[in-house]
Image (cartoon, rainbow, N blue to C red):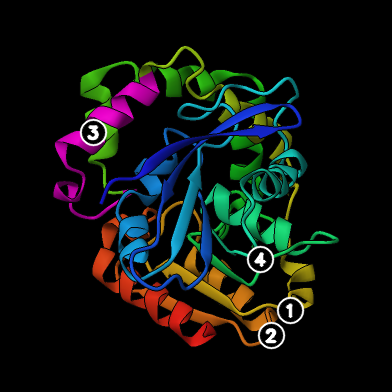
């Protein structure tokens, strides 16, 4: 199935997005938001989006500000700005009460949007989502590791390291194959690896992510923790999380599922942070089943 590249005009510039037109009888629209780091719309959603489109859903997957083909915006990237970005994309695209989903950073954007005044969404889906805990690194010794990680981010040391790895093919391959994203490196084919490398070679690689990290990751923990407000969400919600997610602990997903009224939780055994790429069969079935129950 061929996706269409769309250019959306928003108040601060333009957003590049992929549109996957629905096949057969239209069953509604889905907006999918990707994660941070070396990510973009097609890396996160190039597997799931065509599956949804084949089942009758129109799927829009935008590149976030500073990622993929969307340029850096004229403002500093913060969580609040990214939440506003979701509303900008919905307004510019003409989507009518879409199901809003997100992975990792994109999951936090989706949660923030769902809690925003005037949010227009039919349902919510979050995968390996940010925004469900107040700790960068939870567990024993969390306070020390939070401070060390925050120092590495705010000093610029972590950003320099990330850019160095991203621009070295051997180091990048080692990082991608380390098991933090997917268990089996074979899940990431040559085309995906080339796209990851292109993201790493971009002049503004990691700049958008670094801006967001500096805003979010503080010495005493994470600035945006939606857990105390999740009980306010009043739309059907699906939470999908890898049991072995090294980016966001599965305990955060379990806690969120308790707080969101009627939330459905799917924990993928052994799944890692890119759970939709790590276990596509499990995730595709979970998402399609959830969407079918909305109609």
User: Mark 1 vs mark 2: which is more N-terminal?
Assistant: 1
- Residue at 74% x, 25% y is 76
Q: CA distance from mark 4 to mark 3?
A: 34 Å
Whether residue 84 appears in magenta in the rendering, the answer is no
**Magenta stretch?**
180-200
Above or below, comparing residue 143 to residue 190 in the picture: below
Q: CA distance from mark 1 to mark 2?
A: 7 Å
User: Mark 4 vs mark 2: which is more N-terminal?
Assistant: 4
Mark number displayed over residue 261: 2
Q: Which residue position is annotated with label 4?
A: 97
Above or below, comparing residue 234 to residue 100 in the picture: below
- How many residues crowd mark 3 within 10 Å: few (<14), some (14–19), many (20+)? some
- Residue at 32% x, 31% y is 196
User: Mark 1 vs mark 4: which is more N-terminal?
Assistant: 4
Whether residue 197 appears in magenta in the rendering, the answer is yes
* Helix, strand or loop: magenta stretch: helix
- Element type at mark 3: helix
Q: Which residue position is annotated with label 1?
A: 234
Mark number displayed over residue 193: 3
User: Mark 1 vs mark 3: which is more N-terminal?
Assistant: 3
Q: Do tag 4 and tag 2 residues touch (Cβ < 8 Å)?
A: no
- Element type at mark 1: loop
């Amino acid at each position: 199935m061929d996706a269409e590249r769309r250019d959306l005009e928003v108040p601060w510039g333009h957003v590049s997005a992929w549109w996957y037109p629905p096949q057969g009888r239209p069953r509604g629209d889905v907006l999918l938001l990707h994660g941070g780091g070396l990510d973009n719309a097609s890396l996160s959603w190039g597997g799931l989006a065509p599956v949804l489109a084949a089942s009758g859903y129109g799927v829009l997957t935008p590149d976030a500000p500073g990622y993929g083909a969307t340029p850096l915006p004229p403002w500093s990237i913060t969580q609040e700005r990214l939440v506003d970005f979701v509303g900008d994309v919905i307004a510019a695209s003409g989507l009518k009460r879409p199901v809003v989903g997100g992975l990792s950073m994109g999951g936090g954007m989706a949660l923030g949007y769902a809690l925003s005044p005037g949010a227009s969404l039919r349902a919510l889906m979050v995968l390996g989502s940010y925004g469900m805990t107040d700790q960068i690194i939870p567990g024993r010794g969390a306070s020390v590791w939070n401070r060390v990680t925050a120092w590495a981010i705010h000093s610029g040391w972590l950003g320099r390291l990330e850019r160095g790895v991203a621009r070295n093919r051997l180091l990048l391959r080692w990082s991608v194959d380390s098991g933090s994203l997917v268990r089996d490196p074979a899940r990431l084919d040559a085309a995906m690896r080339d796209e990851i490398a292109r993201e790493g070679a971009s002049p503004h690689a990691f700049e958008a992510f670094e801006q967001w990290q500096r805003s979010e990751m503080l010495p005493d923990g994470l600035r945006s923790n939606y857990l105390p407000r999740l009980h306010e969400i009043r739309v059907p919600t699906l939470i999908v999380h890898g049991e072995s997610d090294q980016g966001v602990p599965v305990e955060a997903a379990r806690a969120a599922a308790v707080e969101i009224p009627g939330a459905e939780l799917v924990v993928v055994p052994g799944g890692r942070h890119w759970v939709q790429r790590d276990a596509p069969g499990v995730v595709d079935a979970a998402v399609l089943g959830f969407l079918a129950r909305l109609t």
